[in-house]
Image (spheres, rainbow, N blue to C red):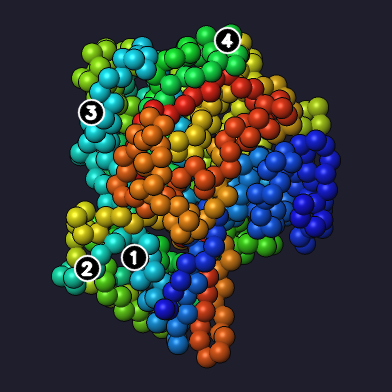
């Protein structure tokens, strides 16, 4: 499993791993969707956005914050997330379907993406991190 | 107790300077022996981290509901000198002005003959859970009104009565609000969520006043034994969450600009008098006002349901008070014998101003500010009063709730939502929620005992018990 929930008293702490940084970011995006929604989503609607950051951690926080904002304002559950990173700027291409209470309800509202304890490291040929979602 | 932490009183513990590098003042927290087992290392480290921030005065404080959060610990309180100190979204949280309000009704338990019908109608009237949308269609001008004037805007729009405004902390609106520091993204999140409850630990609860501990104060607050009351817990919804997110990114850059050394990036901050600090404060205050207006709109929805279901008048449902428990405020406190302008951050902590404070509503002035402490689902909630002791010891602050002891994943693994629903049902407490997982996460076993937490602040004298409430029916977000 590329991501799993770790113990945190107040919020949701996700441990995420991937073979490269763009995939790590994509898995963090899927983890966020998994916390917020239940059921699967088709890929009927397409979106894209770009964010910038001075380091990978800032870039990740900006990417997930934008994803959170988009899922809430567009009311879309994203099932496909593709990330490309080029010199401090990130482009995300997303596909999903409109939120349907009958299919997707049952998740937890995420309020924000925290910097707390956020550090990307390399372990055994994998990139790993712990990221905290405020719920 | 955690290594390095010293006991300094019956209920008082100190985290000495040096516990983490760069501490400017000691940490101080309040816990009874019964609660020490619930304290996590992470929460104490966060308390010590706050003590490293520029301009902090006296202590980095935490109330007895202290637990591990992000940035500040939950239950954290810190005051910063206005001229030399900083402001940080990490000391407020994403849910700006998450807070609680208490309403009284003229009903007693025997009048609630159709509890299921009332809960069903409240559930239909107040949108809850992930993806819930408001039936209001706010114009940009109305959203600006909500952010600028808070509760007063809602009342003018027909969502309440004049008395509602005076019975809110800050009169339901911070005058420093500056919507120009609220982004278009935040506005887009705020429009469809006005008048919604949200999810997680947010709730709407029907309660009964089951014990009067301080008859004089209860009389002043308008609460009688056996009276049916309503408690609402929610915040500034996506608008506030986005304001925190936007300014956190700006303040990350400000930390470098102002050469502030921090042990945790979530404590990103800027001097209170800097353009970045003022921008965050203006946006935060606008979000706080949105939250007060939001709770006011929900109050209107509750009044409509109760007048229809219970045959009472709209004006019979009275707002006792509304408190914020995630906010930063500019206040004056006596420091070394001198009245000093400070910025008090309360993250998971409640203002508890004592008798005679000018910010306490006129009709409560002799008693002190009402302090509303919600319990976990199915457990007791409390109404307390602010004290002079709080003004001297905790910058006029007290606890905000029970405080979690189990993570949400642990709670879901060990507690079954359906079982909790059945158990509470047997005790006469009806629960409505979007799904059973929400019930398991917020089950009473996932929290400290609210009675023990409240007993600590009462014994310390930083607020005093007035009324205990027991739940009759709960709507979980």
Q: Please report whichever mark, 3 or 4, sits nearer to the chain's N-terminal start.
A: 3
Q: Residue at x 39, y 47 (%)?
A: B419
Q: Please report whichever mark, 1 or 2, sits nearer to the chain's N-terminal start.
A: 1
Q: Mark 4: which secondary structure?
A: helix
The residue under label 4 is B215
| Of B409 and B157, the residue lying toward us | B409
Looking at the image, residue B39 sits to the left or right of residue B10; the answer is left
Marks 1/2: CA–CA distance: 10 Å
The residue under label 2 is A41
Q: Mark 2: which secondary structure?
A: loop
Marks 1/3: CA–CA distance: 34 Å
Where residue B226 sits: x, y (%)? 44, 14
Q: Residue at x 22, y 36 (%)?
A: B124
Q: Chain of mark 4?
A: B
Q: Chain of mark 2?
A: A
Position of residue B190 relative to residue A79, above or below, is above
Of tags 4 and 2, the one toward the viewer is 4
Of tags 3 and 2, the one toward the viewer is 3
Of tags 1 and 3, the one toward the viewer is 3
The residue under label 3 is B117
Image quarter for residue B433?
Answer: top left
Marks 3/2: CA–CA distance: 34 Å
Within-10-Å neighbours for mark 1: few <14, some 14–19, many 20+: many
């Amino acid at each position: 499993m590329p991501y799993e929930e770790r113990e945190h008293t107040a919020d949701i702490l996700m441990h995420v791993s991937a073979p490269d940084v763009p995939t790590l970011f994509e898995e963090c995006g899927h983890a966020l969707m998994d916390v917020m929604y239940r059921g699967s989503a088709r890929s009927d609607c397409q979106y894209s956005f770009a964010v910038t950051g001075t380091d990978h951690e800032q870039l990740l926080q900006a990417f997930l914050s934008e994803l959170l904002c988009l899922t809430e304002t567009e009311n879309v559950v994203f099932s496909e997330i593709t990330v490309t990173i080029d010199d401090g700027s990130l482009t995300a291409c997303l596909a999903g379907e409109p939120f349907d209470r009958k299919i997707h309800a049952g998740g937890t509202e995420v309020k924000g993406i925290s910097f707390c304890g956020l550090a990307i490291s390399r372990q055994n040929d994998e990139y790993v991190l712990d990221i905290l979602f405020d719920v | 107790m955690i290594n390095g932490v010293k006991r300094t009183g019956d209920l008082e513990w100190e985290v000495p300077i040096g516990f983490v590098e760069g501490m400017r003042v000691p940490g101080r927290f309040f816990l009874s022996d019964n609660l020490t087992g619930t304290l996590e290392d992470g929460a104490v480290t966060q308390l010590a981290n706050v003590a490293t921030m520029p301009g902090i005065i006296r202590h980095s404080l935490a109330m007895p509901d202290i637990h591990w959060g992000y940035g500040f610990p939950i239950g954290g309180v810190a005051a910063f000198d206005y001229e030399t100190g900083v402001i940080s979204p990490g000391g407020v949280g994403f849910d700006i002005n998450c807070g609680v309000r208490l309403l009284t009704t003229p009903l007693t338990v025997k009048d609630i003959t159709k509890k299921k019908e009332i809960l069903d109608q409240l559930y239909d009237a107040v949108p809850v859970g992930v993806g819930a949308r408001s039936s209001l269609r706010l114009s940009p001008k109305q959203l600006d009104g909500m952010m600028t004037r808070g509760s007063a805007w809602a009342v003018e729009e027909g969502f309440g009565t004049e008395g509602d405004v005076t019975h809110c902390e800050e009169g339901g609106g911070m005058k420093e609000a500056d919507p120009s520091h609220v982004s278009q993204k935040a506005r887009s999140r705020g429009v469809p969520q006005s008048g919604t409850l949200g999810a997680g630990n947010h709730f709407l609860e029907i309660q009964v006043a089951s014990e009067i501990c301080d008859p004089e104060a209860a009389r002043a607050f308008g609460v009688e034994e056996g009276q049916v009351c309503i408690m609402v817990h929610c915040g500034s919804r996506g608008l506030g969450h986005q304001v925190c997110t936007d300014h956190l990114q700006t303040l990350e850059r400000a930390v470098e600009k102002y050469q502030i050394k921090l042990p945790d990036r979530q404590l990103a901050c800027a001097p209170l008098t800097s353009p970045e600090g003022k921008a965050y404060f203006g946006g935060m205050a606008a979000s706080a006002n949105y939250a007060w207006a939001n709770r006011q709109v929900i109050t209107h929805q509750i009044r409509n349901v109760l007048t229809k279901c219970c045959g009472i008048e709209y004006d019979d449902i009275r707002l006792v008070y509304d408190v914020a428990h995630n906010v930063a405020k500019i206040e004056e406190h006596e420091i070394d014998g001198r009245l000093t302008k400070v910025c008090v951050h309360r993250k998971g902590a409640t203002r508890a101003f004592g008798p005679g404070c000018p910010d306490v509503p006129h009709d409560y002035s002799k008693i002190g500010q009402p302090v509303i402490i919600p319990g976990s689902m199915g457990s007791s909630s409390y109404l307390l009063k602010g004290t002079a002791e709080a003004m001297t010891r905790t910058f006029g602050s007290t606890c905000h709730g029970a405080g979690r002891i189990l993570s949400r994943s642990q709670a879901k693994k060990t507690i079954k939502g359906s079982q909790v629903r059945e158990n509470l049902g047997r005790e006469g407490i009806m629960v409505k929620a979007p799904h059973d997982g929400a019930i398991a996460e917020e089950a009473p076993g996932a929290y400290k005992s609210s009675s023990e937490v409240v007993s600590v602040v009462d014994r310390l004298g930083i607020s005093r018990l007035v009324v205990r409430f027991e739940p009759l029916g709960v709507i979980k977000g």
